[in-house]
Image: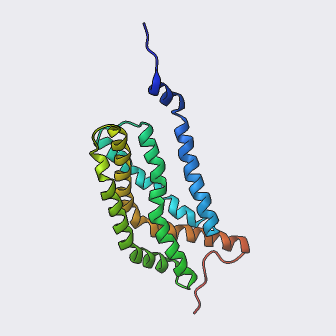
Amino acid sequence: MGYDWTATSYQEKRVGYQAYFIYALSVTLVFMVLAALYESWTSPAAVILVVPMALVGVLVALMLRSFDNNLYTQIGLVLMIALASKNAILVVEFARDLQRAGMPVKEAAIEATSRRFRPIVMTSFAFILGVSPLLFATGAGAASQRAIGTVVFGGMLSSTLMAMPFVPVFYVATQWMSERRRRRKHGGPERPEKKA
């Protein structure tokens, strides 16, 4: 006597390892689109570095609700890559505009975060409250709605509260690395010399 996987369980088992490929492909596509839009390889890194922090909230929410990793949580995880990036994009884009206007990198990052914090929090919490009915869904398809709702709720909460303070840090760090690489390439000094 033995056992065998059947129906949906068989399909999930069969394609289980493809989920990692899909996550990597999603992050890569977001990075490539942002690199094309920003015409830079470093600015998108400040956006992408926020995604793992959103995933912390997803994992905590799934553990608190004792949900497993099923197809619907995987769909929610792919969705979270885009949603977590959205908030960081608003800060990075505004910081880049301020930097182009002549503001130093650190000041631009701080100013962008302070000016964009309220709109980001308002839209994020509107979204979080909008998906909260999915957490308590009943009836047909409730399991899938609760799974996606839990992933998105936890991820957006984590992305908004935990990740937003780190966006300016990531932005300054990536800009510093870009400037350092540019100076090495063109043979300039490692650090700008102070004029007396």
Residue extending farthest to the top is 1
Residue located 59% across and 53% down the image:
28
Quarter holding the C terminus is: bottom right
Near-viewer residue (111 or 19): 19
Residue located 55% across and 52% down the image:
27
Q: Position of residue 70 (x, y in %)?
A: 42, 36
The image shows residue 69, relative to residue 127, as above or below, that is above
Near-viewer residue (167 or 73): 73
Is there any visible trace of residue 90 in the rendered image?
Answer: yes
Q: Is residue 98 left or right of residue 115?
A: right
Q: Position of residue 125 (x, y in %)?
A: 32, 62
- Res 68 → quadrant: top left
Q: Position of residue 144 (x, y in %)?
A: 37, 40
Residue located 58% across and 81% down the image:
100
Q: Position of residue 114 (x, y in %)?
A: 39, 76
- Counting every numbered tag in the picture gives 0
The image shows residue 18, relative to residue 60, as above or below, that is above
